[in-house]
Image (tube, helix red, strand yellow):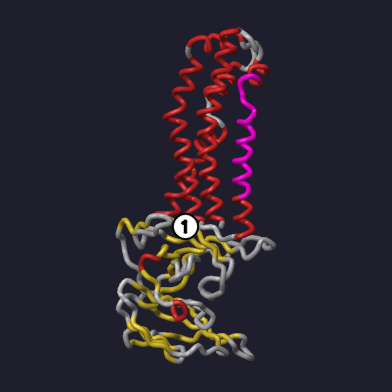
Amino acid sequence: MVNLILISVAALSLVVWLFQEVKGRRQMQQALQWCSEKRTANDAGSLRQQALPGWLEWTYRIVLLGWFAWIASVVLIKDGDFALALVVLTIIAGIIGGLDRFVFEKARQAFVSTGNVAVYITYFIKQDQESLKNEFAGALPIAENARSFFPVLLVVLVLRSFVIEPFQIPSASMVPSLEVGDYILVNKFNYGLRLPVLGTKIFEVDDPKRGDVMVFFPPNDKRYFIKRVIGLPGDEIRYINKQLYINDELVQQTVLAEVPPLQPITQVIKEQLGNVDHLVHHDKRIYRGDFVTTVKPGHYFMMGDNRDNSSDSRVWGQVPEQNIVGQAFAIWMHWESFSDLPSFSRVGRIR
């Protein structure tokens, strides 16, 4: 729904601007030409009143209302795809800004700078001569905003798609490594460059390693998830009585603590996955059963560090390579809710 509103408003913006630029600009130029030939409207105020069609303003307001409606839908419905939104905004700003800059701008400036119009503005209009030149030769509001925002949107799109993307941790499935409210940074380069929205890999870099904390889309789900890479393609994974075996080798675990001390519920365990050592929680009250599986080619087996309270590959299956988003590598802020103050006490590298 939110994505449909976004695409509709973007298309409306382009259509309205083109109509304004073609139809409205012609009306403006005809009025300015008539005034220059008749030597009428010798002050800036009456010239604006004669030459600026009233419908330019209300069509612009319609476009503004459309964007406010999209923002409201994002806040209320919360099912928008931010990557798609960024791509659409960048494309629409680039199209409008590019057409305005390279197609329409020269014709406007040529009209204002030649013939009776230039003489009229220079000698007969005594007020706001530069303002009038900018008004009749400059960009309309939609194009002006597009030209201003396009460089910013393009930089954000490139950085977010190919370099680093921020995420917020929404659940406790990765406790104790990541807590609810942690804001993390995800490297979009390590696992290869992918086209935004489509997810198609266009440049190979490296493959996920066992123990990496990875952001991805689960099978048949459009939401981002974050878990730890447990099984690589071809691995046999066994989970027996909360003990993890990879290719028949027991993953080394060391119990560090049991909390709370008097009636222990949670075991805090240090686990060694290849070269990565990290903390794991086991809930002594929960037993989810044993399983044995082999990771399919081009897939990865993911598990949360909060082993007994995590929806992961044990629930929704193995993650195909094309669903990978990037490698989580750092916490840069913790902010659990708007009623709390942001904290930077957890800033650091993700293990």
Residue 53, image x, y percentages: 62, 26
Residue 133, image x, y percentages: 55, 19
> Dot 1: within a 10 Å radius of its alpha carbon, few (fewer than 14), some, or many (20 or more) residues?
some
Q: Is residue 336 above or below residue 293?
A: above
Q: Determine which residue is flagged by label 1.
A: 165
Q: Which residues are magenta?
A: 50-69
Viewer-closest of 139 and 331: 139
Residue most toward the right? 339
Badge count: 1
Judge from the rendering whether residue 39 lies leftward or rightward of residue 311; answer left or right: right
1 magenta-colored:
no
Task: Give me the residue at 34% from left, 79% from top.
Answer: 295
Most common secondary structure along the magenta stretch: helix
Residue 279, image x, y percentages: 48, 78
Residue 92, image x, y percentages: 48, 43
Task: Give me the residue at 37% from left, 74% from top.
Answer: 300
Judge from the rendering whether residue 69 lies leftward or rightward of residue 278; answer left or right: right
